[in-house]
Image (cartoon, rainbow, N blue to C red):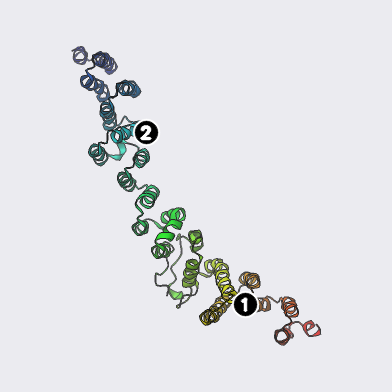
Amino acid sequence: WAAEIARQGSAPAETRAEIYRQHGDALFEKRAYDQALNIYMKTVDLKLPLEPSYVVEQYLDAQRIGHVAKYLKRLHEQNLAEREHTALLLKCYTKLKDFSTLGAFLETTPVSQYDPATAIEVLEGAGYYGLAAEIAQKVEHHEDYVRISLEHFKHYTKTADFLRTLPKARACHIVLEHGRVLMQHAPQDTIDLVRDICGLRSDGEAAPSDIVPRGDVPRVDELLPIFVDDLPRLQLFLRSVLLAPGGCQLPPPEAERLYPTLLELMARSHHELLAAEEASPDDEQRARRLHGEIMRLIRQYPSEGSLASTLMLCQTYGFVDGFFHAAERLGRFQLLMNWCFQQKDARRLLDVCKRCGSVDQSLWGQ
């Protein structure tokens, strides 16, 4: 009645809030917890709530978690809740195992009334992964949604499909974070996703005239780290881009950045086939076929920088024809002569002199 008199007498809201506090305290001391809570919540409706910890601590001390939840919910309804209030409210619901009320709160409460990042963290920590994922998707916390989908639900293909719906730059950022896991469990879906992000044709047969204008599209080399655990698939992927039947799908500068990586992978594979202790006829045939593909790749990149990479990598992996091709075009004739002398290869030595002697007469003298 004191509060009603104060209201009718146009007393300041602060005065009425203090009256409610005293009334609530009196009821609380009598263990009339429900009535006390109703009075305390009147201060929230006045937009002049008591210090929330004042009410919360009283009810927590009395082990009245349900009352704490009701009070915190009212704070959210009046847009007076802070980050820690959201966390505590959700913890109350999870402690009470009140899934229906928890779900209803998240479904009906506007996101503006609570901190979504806190909600996601609390729900995930309590094992409510589905609700955490729903909120993350609802508020476009894409990184959290992807992480939860992969860690807790193992939705690899579904996650790859979801990433296709995002702006390419955003998808690229997330793929760099989680792409290795995706590659392990859904490799083809992930490769198709990378193609989509980088604006590549999925069939790998784009002709040069069909090359997509790059603009702000992420570069292929930005996403190579996700292949670190699966180099054979990286080789197949790069071959489909740089050695596509219809021609390379990338502009020359971007293709040249990828060229050394693909050359190293192919040269290493060729070396391993030849170095096998018991190479089968199939291995020898594969090595011959791979040799031709490597030379085709090398001839596609005649720039000085690419030839320098070719020279180093072919020398490292013993790919002789590539080494000779690069050294000759770089004018490194002495390298070729030295190799022939070291290997005692008279046939190649004579070939070098015939092909390069007109450019460097000193070769015949050696």
Query: What's the residue at 29%, 21% (across, down)?
Result: 62
**Viewer-proximal residue among 98 and 239:** 98
x and y percentages locating residue 113 in the rendered image:
30, 35
Q: Is residue 282 left or right of residue 141?
A: right
Spatial separation of the CA atoms under disc 2 and disc 1: 63 Å
Q: Is residue 169 left or right of residue 359?
A: left
**Viewer-proximal residue among 163 and 252:** 163
Dividing the picture into quadrants, the one containing residue 270 is: bottom right
Q: In the displayed image of the protein, which residue is found farthest to the right? A: 365
Q: Secondary structure at mark 2?
A: helix
Q: Could you tell me if residue 294 is visible in this image? A: yes
Q: Which residue is mark 2?
A: 83
- Mark 2 or 1, nearer chain start: 2
x and y percentages locating residue 117 in the rendered image:
37, 40
Q: Which mark is residue 322?
A: 1
Dividing the picture into quadrants, the one containing residue 323 is: bottom right
Give the answer, above or below, for where 66 lies relative to 174. above
x and y percentages locating residue 161 in the rendered image:
34, 59
Which quadrant would the C terminus be assigned to in this image? Answer: bottom right
**Viewer-proximal residue among 274 and 257:** 274
Q: Amino acid at mark 2?
A: Arg
Q: Secondary structure at mark 1?
A: helix
Q: In the displayed image of the protein, which residue is found farthest to the front? A: 278
Q: Give the number of marks.
A: 2
Q: Is residue 77 left or right of residue 310?
A: left
Which quadrant would the N terminus be assigned to in this image? Answer: top left
Q: Nearer the viewer, mark 2 or mark 1?
A: 1
Give the answer, above or below, for where 115 lies relative to 157. above
Question: Local crowd at mark 2 within 10 Å, few (<14), some, or many (≥20)?
Answer: few
Q: Amino acid at mark 1?
A: Gly
